[in-house]
Image (cartoon, helix red, strand yellow):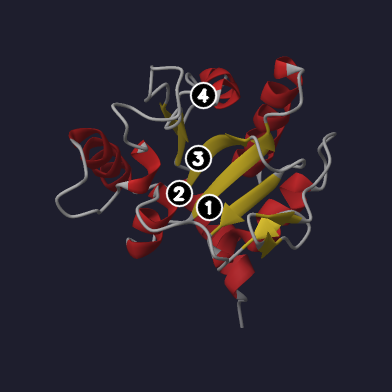
Amino acid sequence: MESKFDSLVKNLLHKKTFVIVSGLHGDEPAGNKAAEYFKNQKNVHVISNINKTNKRRVDGRDLNRHFDDKGHSDKIQEDIISQIEELNPSMVIDLHEDDEVDGVYAYCSSELENIVKYCLSNIELDIAKSAHGDKTNRGVIVNGKQPYKGTLERALAKRNIPYCTIETPSNIENFEKRVECLKNIVHNLIGS
């Protein structure tokens, strides 16, 4: 009998369509720079530089807290979800930076847990042991307190679309090191 993990890997290999999202928070530039690297790759669709304000919020609103938020979502969130649903990807990879956690971590849907753990095992930056009250398992959080209501992750989970949100520590002053870390993790995810 085929395991859930084997089934997922087979599905990923069969579909091989990925969506990379970056720039929901304008003060997290490493994701946008990393996403640019993947723009012309086959079967990879990039939705980047969404929030161009260089600030976390747009007009006082956090774009990553209003997905599927009746009466509060914007056209931006609706367009992102529509694009993703139309593409029906094997995985959505959302790139972020965290100014409160000292290591790399990822939130992901349960079927991706082992793949994401493997992809995080080969990076040069430290792996976070916890993030915002959630303990990580080798850097991975599944079914934690986060992702919060209104996040892209919650919207994807509701639609049964596999997701992985990667968070690198923004307190590392070397911007290029953060970019390279994100690129390496994404490269491993889409090559797995």
- Which of 40 and 177 lies nearest the eye of the viewer? 177
Question: Farthest residue in the bottom direction?
Answer: 1
**CA–CA distance in space, label 4 to label 2:** 33 Å
Residue 189 quadrant: top right
Disc 1 crowd rating (10 Å Cα; few below 14, some 14-19, many 20+) is some
**CA–CA distance in space, label 3 to label 4:** 15 Å
- Which of 116 and 68 lies nearest the eye of the viewer? 68
Q: Earlier in the sequence, mark 3 or mark 4?
A: 4
Where 83 falls versus 150 (above or below)?
above
- Pick the quarter of the image with the N terminus: bottom right
- Which of 161 and 88 lies nearest the eye of the viewer? 161
Residue 185 coordinates in the image, percent (x, y) = 68, 37
Per the image, the residue denoted by label 1 is 12
Tag 1 secondary structure: helix
Q: Residue at x 48, y 28 (%)?
A: 42
Q: Which mark is residue 15?
A: 2
